[in-house]
C-alpha cells in the first residue's frame, strides 16, 4: 500500500509560468490586458478557431454563448443528463428551458438516435457534451442542427486537444456554432480558474466580447469599437466574465505544454485499459464508431456493483483506504432535487444515464503521475475488485 495519498488530479505549474505570473504582478497590469490578448491569439492559432475569447470560467462561456445566440424565454435547448450542472444552469440563466436526451452507454455521450424525439417547435439549440474527452459524433449532431435550424454549443470542458475525424475540437467555422473550454485546475490545462469561447461566427464573437465586460463598447472591436477616447457606449446589459492577465500568464505556458500533457494522459489511460480489461468488477467504456482522438481528461470505468457486491461509494472508500484518491463525474443531472422539482424529472426517465450515474468512478489521471503512481492505482483497483464484497 502507498505510504502517501495520491490525489485524483493535480495541476502541473512550471517555474516559467510562475515567473510570468510574477512578471504580471510586478508590471501593475494584473487584470485583462496584453497577456490575455496574447493567450487568445495563441489559443485561436492552436485550435484553428477564427475567434477565441478568454473568460473567467467555462460556465461563463456557456452562459455567454446562450446569450450571444439570442436564447431566451420560451426557447428549449437539448442537452445530456450526464454532465456537470453548469451545462443546465447556464441554459436556465439565459431564461431558456433544458430538454434532456439520454446517453449512449458505450460512449457516455448524448445518444444521437434520440435527438429527433426531443425536438419541439420551441427547440432553438443543442449543447452536446464531449464526456471525459471523447468527442461526440458531431457530423450527426450538426446534420440534426442543420435540418432544424438549431444553434450548436459544444461543451468541450473535457476535450481540449481532442480530435473528431482529424479536426481539433473547437476548430469549427460554422455560423451559430460555439465551442467552450474549461481551465479549471483538474482540466487538461489550467489557468487556476478560466475558460475560452471559440467560434467562427463573427457576430457571436463580437457580442461575447461586449457581454463579458458589462456590455461596454470600450475594448470591443469593429462596429462597436471606440478608438482614442475615454468614452464608451453600452449595447447590452452585460456581465463581468473576463480573464485576468495573471491567469493568462499561466495559460500561455500551459498551452505550450498541452500536447505533452495529453500524450502522458493517453499513456496512463492505455496502461489502465490493459490492466483492467477483463477484470471482474469493472466495466470499461466502449469505443466510438468514428475516427477520433480522445482528450483523456478523466478515466471513468463503471463499478460492477452487482458482481462485486459493493456500491460505487464503498468502492471509492476502499481505494481511499489504500491512499488512492477518486472523484465522481457525475451524478446524472435529473436526479438532483432542484431539477426534479422544477421540471418533473424523476428516476426512470433516463435509464442509461442512471445506470452510469450509479456506477461511474474517476481514477487518478494527471500528467505528473509517475509510472509507480500508475502501478499503485492498478494494484489498488485489482485488490478491491478481487476481494469482492469481503
Image (cartoon, rainbow, N blue to C red):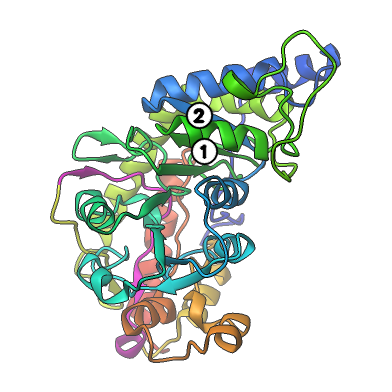
Describe the element under mark 2 as helix, strand or loop: strand
**Res 52 label:** 2
Q: Where 80 falls versus 356 (above or below)? A: above
Q: Where 212 falls versus 44 (above or below)? A: below
In the image, taking residue 122 as reference, residue 322 lies left or right, namely right
- Front residue (pair 100, 144): 144
Q: Of all residues shown, which one is farthest toward the top? A: 228
**Res 197 label:** 1
Evaluate if marks 2 and 1 touch, with contact meaning CB atoms under 8 Å apart: yes
Q: Where 25 falls versus 114 (above or below)? A: above
- Is residue 12 visible in the rendered image? The answer is no
Describe the element under mark 1 as helix, strand or loop: strand
Whether 297 is among the magenta residues is yes
Q: Residue at x 36, y 71 (%)?
A: 121
Relative image position of residue 67 (x, y in whole percent): 58, 50
- Residue 61 sits in which quadrant? top right
Q: Which residues are magenta?
A: 291-308
Amino acid at each position: 500500500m502507498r505510504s502517501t495519498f495520491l490525489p485524483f488530479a493535480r495541476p502541473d505549474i512550471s517555474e516559467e509560468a510562475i515567473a510570468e505570473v510574477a512578471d504580471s504582478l510586478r508590471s501593475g497590469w494584473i487584470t485583462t490586458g496584453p497577456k490575455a490578448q496574447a493567450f487568445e491569439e495563441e489559443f485561436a492559432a492552436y485550435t484553428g478557431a477564427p475567434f477565441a475569447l478568454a473568460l473567467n470560467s467555462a460556465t461563463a462561456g456557456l452562459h455567454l454563448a446562450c446569450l450571444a445566440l439570442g436564447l431566451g424565454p420560451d426557447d428549449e435547448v437539448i442537452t445530456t443528463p450526464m454532465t456537470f450542472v453548469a451545462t443546465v444552469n447556464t441554459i436556465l440563466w439565459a431564461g431558456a428551458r433544458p430538454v434532456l436526451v439520454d446517453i449512449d452507454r458505450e460512449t457516455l455521450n448524448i445518444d444521437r438516435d434520440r435527438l429527433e424525439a426531443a425536438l419541439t417547435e420551441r427547440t432553438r439549440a443543442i449543447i452536446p457534451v464531449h464526456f471525459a474527452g471523447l468527442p461526440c459524433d458531431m457530423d450527426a449532431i450538426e446534420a440534426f442542427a442543420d435540418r432544424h435550424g438549431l444553434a450548436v454549443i459544444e461543451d468541450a470542458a473535457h476535450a481540449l486537444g481532442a480530435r473528431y475525424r482529424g479536426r481539433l475540437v473547437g476548430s469549427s467555422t460554422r455560423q451559430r456554432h460555439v465551442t467552450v473550454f474549461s481551465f479549471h485546475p483538474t482540466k487538461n490545462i489550467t489557468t487556476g480558474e478560466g475558460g475560452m469561447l471559440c467560434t467562427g461566427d463573427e457576430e457571436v464573437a463580437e457580442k461575447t466580447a461586449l457581454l463579458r465586460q458589462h456590455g461596454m463598447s470600450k475594448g470591443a472591436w469593429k462596429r462597436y469599437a471606440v478608438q482614442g477616447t475615454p468614452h464608451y457606449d453600452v449595447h447590452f446589459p452585460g456581465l463581468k466574465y473576463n480573464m485576468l492577465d495573471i491567469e493568462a500568464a499561466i495559460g500561455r505556458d500551459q498551452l505550450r505544454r498541452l500536447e505533452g500533457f495529453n500524450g502522458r494522459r493517453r499513456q496512463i489511460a492505455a496502461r489502465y485499459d490493459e490492466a483492467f480489461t477483463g477484470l471482474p468488477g469493472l466495466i470499461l467504456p466502449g469505443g466510438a464508431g468514428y475516427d477520433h482522438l480522445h482528450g483523456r481528461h478523466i478515466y471513468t470505468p463503471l463499478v460492477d456493483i452487482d458482481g462485486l457486491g459493493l456500491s460505487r461509494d464503498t468502492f471509492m472508500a476502499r481505494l481511499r483506504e489504500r491512499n488512492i484518491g477518486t472523484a465522481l463525474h457525475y451524478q446524472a443531472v435529473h436526479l438532483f432535487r432542484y431539477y426534479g422539482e422544477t421540471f418533473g424529472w424523476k428516476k426512470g426517465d433516463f435509464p442509461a444515464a442512471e445506470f452510469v450515474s450509479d456506477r461511474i468512478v474517476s481514477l487518478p489521471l494527471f500528467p505528473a503521475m509517475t509510472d509507480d503512481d500508475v502501478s499503485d492505482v492498478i494494484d489498488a483497483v485489482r485488490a478491491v475488485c478481487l476481494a469482492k464484497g469481503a
